[in-house]
């Protein structure tokens, strides 16, 4: 494809300075894996950080020489001439702490014990991630990002950047996200966690040493999550009540197309994703709540923000509904920040933020064109 | 470029004349963001637009004008009370469904309101009705069956609404073909612009 960033290589940064987490746990040393696309300009003003969501990672765009089919998860959005234009911006994707794609996480070896961290890996929050990301920015010589961009849990990190480091981010693009999870969302996450925690192969998080994987729990967690990331409409359109064999079998084997699809997705996910990472990610989602220390007044919590915002939501997203994005907009308006808000008509539920859509992409492109002009 | 915008939309010039430097402005139904862009450049306003159309959202973002996508007929619950110096509704009043409720919302959110609309009482409109047809003109360019205008009114009608809803009119500007109209405005004016606030 001509507008791809092409072949990319993951890089690794090692940090020896201990990082204290919100939970007060300390990680004495850690690695972050990341990728970069485009070129950092002379005054280092054109850097964009991409924050990933629950199952994402540092491989955001392009593909690997040794694995050409492994295309970055947001390759439709990022590349030369694409909305996040690598001809104009220096784009960084990283794998967050606690991840399972190369950055230090529960499946990594703890140098202190010579065994995987497992259950001893600290619970990590969005704020902890942002601190770690800031250290990577320091390492790369980036004092201020032109923009920090993320969808869903990634959007929470982007917002947190403007709160924790108001001087270090000029624009936040908060997509399909919320100022905190709804009760219902926390409940979904709890069911997903319970599926993993009660799997006999979980072994309290230390399954690595037993050479087993809590596949059943992880598969269930993913199946549940996947349902909630789609919309009823999208699922009905894709599968309807279609039967694999065309008739009822009166048993519990896979009969409906949607069952087949969900189990396939669950199996695929459970084959590569780490169960502890899944637990950590859902917990980070649950804990995110910047208004918690402001008597649940988001407007007051947003007082430190200096960045300009683009907020984007999707009409069919019921996990991170447009109403939740409007809460963000209202709190920004209260603080007289620059903000634009687009509500994209889409059938694909929460997953819409990863899909190509004319209006969505044009909104992103137009906004970032102005960000690029400032940086030039 | 700025001059051509004001020439194309004489009500913009009248509106801009009332906006002081550095004011905060909410432009309801802001279209492609031209007025906000003009006010930003000439008055350094802190401005936001509200717009429903996908295409206009793109235009506003392209211009670098703050825009919030939303439907005015769902009210202004996304905006805090007294959070703007001016709330503007230019050439949109007649296309809103819940016009009465929106007038109240304008004065909840803004310290002052500015509204412009085509005067249905303009003599050329009256003539067309007298001759048996719904009027079509530069200000009212639609056929009766495809018009977005569901609440057309005359100057007198609007002033009656203000009278009965505790709205105090501070100033009025009536224009025809880019020129001010002083005499018999309800008959001779094609576009009206009003500045108003809550009656204390």
Image (cartoon, helix red, strand yellow):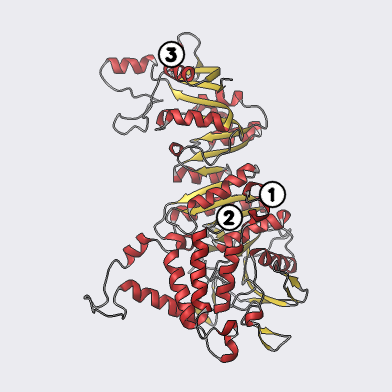
Which x, y percent locates residue B130? 28, 14
Which x, y percent locates residue A293? 68, 54
Can the viewer see residue A376? no
Q: Earlier in the sequence, mark 2 or mark 1?
A: 2
Q: Are marks 3 and 1 in contact (CB under 8 Å)?
A: no
* Residue A179: numbered disc: 2
Which one is nearer the viewer's eye here, B168 or A38? B168
- As drawn, B19 above or below A281: above
Residue A274 shown left or right of residue A306 in the figure: left
* Residue B61: numbered disc: none
Tag 1 subunit: A
Residue at the far right in the pictured view: A17
Q: Residue at x 55, y 26 (%)?
A: B113
The residue that label 1 is drawn on is: A306
Residue A122 shown left or right of residue A261 in the figure: right
Whole-Å distance between the Cαs marked 2 and 1?
Answer: 17 Å
Q: Residue at x 64, y 76 (%)?
A: A103
Can the viewer see residue A151? yes
The residue that label 3 is drawn on is: B186
Which x, y percent locates residue A28? 75, 77
Which one is nearer the viewer's eye here, B107 or A31? B107
- As drawn, A115 above or below B99: below
Residue at the far top in the pictured view: B183
Tag 2 subunit: A
Which x, y percent locates residue A244? 27, 76
Q: Determine whether the residue tagged by mark 2 lies in a helix, strand or loop.
A: loop
Q: Residue at x 27, y 80 (%)?
A: A251
Residue A252 shown left or right of residue A203 in the figure: left
The answer to whether tags 3 and 2 share a subunit is: no
Whole-Å distance between the Cαs marked 3 and 2?
Answer: 50 Å
């Amino acid at each position: 494809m001509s507008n791809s960033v092409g072949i990319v290589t993951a890089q690794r940064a090692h940090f020896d300075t201990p990082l204290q987490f919100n939970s007060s746990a300390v990680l004495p040393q850690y690695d972050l894996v990341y990728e970069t696309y485009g070129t950092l300009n002379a005054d280092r003003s054109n850097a964009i950080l991409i924050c990933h969501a629950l199952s994402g990672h540092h491989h955001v765009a392009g593909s690997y020489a040794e694995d050409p089919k492994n295309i970055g998860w947001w390759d439709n959005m990022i590349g030369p001439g694409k909305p996040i234009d690598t001809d104009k911006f220096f784009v960084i994707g990283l794998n967050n702490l606690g991840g399972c794609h190369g950055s230090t996480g529960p499946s990594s070896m703890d140098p202190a014990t010579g065994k995987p961290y497992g259950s001893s890996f600290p619970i990590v929050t969005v704020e902890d991630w942002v601190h770690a990301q800031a250290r990577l920015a320091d390492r790369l010589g980036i004092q201020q990002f032109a923009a920090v961009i993320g969808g869903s849990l990634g959007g929470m990190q982007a917002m947190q950047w403007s709160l924790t480091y108001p001087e270090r981010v000029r624009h936040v693009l908060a997509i399909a996200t919320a100022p905190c999870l709804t009760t219902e969302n926390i409940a979904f996450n709890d069911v997903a966690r319970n599926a993993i925690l009660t799997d006999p192969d979980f072994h309290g998080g230390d399954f690595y040493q037993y050479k087993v994987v809590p596949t059943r729990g992880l598969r269930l967690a993913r199946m549940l999550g996947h349902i909630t990331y789609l919309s009823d409409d999208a699922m009905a359109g894709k599968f309807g009540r279609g039967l694999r064999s065309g008739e009822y079998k009166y048993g519990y084997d896979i009969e409906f197309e949607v069952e087949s699809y969900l189990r396939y997705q669950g199996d695929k996910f459970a084959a590569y994703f780490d169960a502890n990472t899944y637990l950590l990610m859902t917990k980070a989602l649950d804990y995110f709540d910047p208004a918690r220390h402001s008597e649940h007044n988001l407007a007051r919590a947003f007082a430190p923000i200096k960045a300009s915002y683009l907020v984007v939501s999707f009409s069919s997203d019921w996990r991170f509904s447009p109403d939740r994005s409007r809460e963000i907009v209202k709190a920004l308006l209260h603080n007289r920040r620059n903000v634009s808000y687009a509500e994209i008509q889409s059938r694909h539920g929460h997953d819409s933020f990863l899909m190509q859509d004319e209006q969505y992409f044009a909104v992103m492109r137009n906004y970032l064109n102005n960000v690029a002009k400032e940086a030039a | 470029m700025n001059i051509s915008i004001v020439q194309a939309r004489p009500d913009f010039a009248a509106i801009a004349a009332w906006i002081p430097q550095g004011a905060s402005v909410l432009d309801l139904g802001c279209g492609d963001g031209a007025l906000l862009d003009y006010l930003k450049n000439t008055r350094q306003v802190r401005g936001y637009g509200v717009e429903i159309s996908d295409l206009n959202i793109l235009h506003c973002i392209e211009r670098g004008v703050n825009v919030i996508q939303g439907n005015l007929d769902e009210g202004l619950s996304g905006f805090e009370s007294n959070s703007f110096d001016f709330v503007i509704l230019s050439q949109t009043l007649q296309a809103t469904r819940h016009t009465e409720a929106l007038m109240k919302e304008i004065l909840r959110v803004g310290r002052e309101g500015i509204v412009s609309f085509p005067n249905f009482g303009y003599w050329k409109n009256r003539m067309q009705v007298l001759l048996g047809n719904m009027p079509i003109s530069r200000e009212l360019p639609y056929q009766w069956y495809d018009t977005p205008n569901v609440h057309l009114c005359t100057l007198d009608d609007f002033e009656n609404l203000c009278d009965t809803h505790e709205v105090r009119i501070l100033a009025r500007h009536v224009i025809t073909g880019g020129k001010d109209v002083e005499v018999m405005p309800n008959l001779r004016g094609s576009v009206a612009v009003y500045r108003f606030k809550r009656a204390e």
